Amino acid sequence: MLLKMTAGLSGPEFNLSPGDEYEFEDDEADRLIAAGFAEKAGAEPAPIKTKKGKANVVSTEGDAGA
């Protein structure tokens, strides 16, 4: 099964970076997808989960100075 990597993965026969495509046997491909390391090539990418909250901003005003 052709997979597109979402995480880096290295082995004795390959060195893959996020975005690389590689052909894996079906059992191994299923394990990589379940672990979140890859997705089927050509599939729409899963939405990225973001954490909502206040921005981490440091003010240049006040006691700390700039």
Image: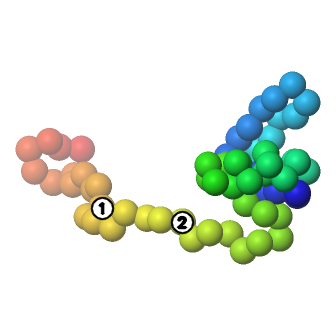
Q: Give how far across and how far down residue 2 sits, in percent.
A: 88, 58
Q: In this view, does 64 lie to the left or right of 8?
A: left
Residue 14 seen in the figure: yes
Please state which amino acid type lies under the numbered disc 2. Answer: Ile
Label 1 secondary element: loop
Q: Quadrant of residue 1?
A: bottom right
In the displayed structure, 34 sits above or below 43; it is above
* Residue for badge 2: 48
The residue sitting at 87% across, 25% down in the picture is 12
Q: In this view, does 45 lie to the left or right of 24?
A: left
Q: Give how far across and how far down residue 60 sits, in percent.
A: 22, 52
In the displayed structure, 53 sits above or below 20; it is below
The answer to which of marks 2 and 1 sits earlier in the sequence is: 2
Density class for disc 1 (Cα within 10 Å; few <14, some 14-19, many ≥20) is few
Q: Give how far across and how far down residue 35 sits, in percent.
A: 61, 49
Q: How far apart are marks 2 and 1 (CA)?
A: 18 Å
* Residue for badge 1: 55
Label 2 secondary element: loop
The residue sitting at 17% across, 43% down in the picture is 65
